[in-house]
Amino acid sequence: MRLSLMTVFLLAAGTAQAQAPAATPAAPWGSPTVGNGACCQSIDEVRGHIDRIDAEIVRLMAERGRYVHEAARFKPDPTHVEVPARAEAVVRKAMALAQQNGLSPQIAEATYRPMLRAYLDYEQQVFAKASAAGQTPWQK
């Protein structure tokens, strides 16, 4: 049996449609707000953007962690890791930046306080490792 090129094309198109995943249903309420309404047409598109942003956030957190490690070098001993006034200033600055960028300051605060706690704990670990290796000045 010999098929025309058009028949092959139509059969292939039908097979592709049959194998295509079901379209994401339209949002049940509201209208797009990101990109002046240009985004988003599906939940998958939203999730793709969130995944992209999360990857960037984690990259920036890793960079921040490297600077926290560096900060430890400038502190004479572990008792100087926690500086409450500095931590409070960082949180307040994050809240102000949030306000300027259209983010709820409460979200910034709720994110920054535990993040700073985690970095302070990490900095204490940096001191502990340096101390165990005999690299700290207070041991000499």
Image: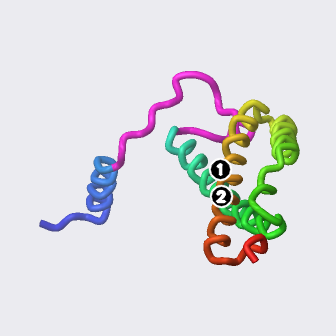
Task: Judge left or right: residue 130 versus residue 71.
Answer: left
Give amino acid for label 1.
Answer: Ala
Crowd around label 2: few <14 · some 14–19 · many ≥20 (10 Å): some
Q: CA distance from mark 2 to mark 1?
A: 6 Å
Q: Based on the displayed image, in which of its 4 quarters is residue 62 positioned?
A: bottom right
Query: Which mark is drawn over residue 118?
Result: 1
Which range of residues does the magenta coloring cover? 20-42
- Give the residue furthest to the left: 1
**Residue drawn at 59 percent across, 46 percent down:** 50
Main structural element of the magenta stretch: helix, strand or loop?
A: loop
Could you say which is closer to the camera, residue 52 or residue 8? 52
Q: Based on the displayed image, in which of its 4 quarters is residue 108 positioned?
A: top right
Query: Which mark is drawn over residue 13?
Result: none
**Residue drawn at 78 percent across, 74 percent down:** 137
Q: Are marks 2 and 1 in contact (CB under 8 Å)?
A: yes
Residue 135 location (% of width, % of height)? 70, 77
Query: Which mark is drawn over residue 122?
Result: 2
Q: Secondary structure at mark 1?
A: helix
Could you say which is closer to the camera, residue 110 or residue 29? 110
Could you say which is closer to the camera, residue 46 or residue 74? 74
**Residue drawn at 55 percent across, 49 percent down:** 48
Residue 5 location (% of width, % of height)? 30, 65
Q: Tell me how many marks there are.
A: 2
Q: Secondary structure at mark 2?
A: helix
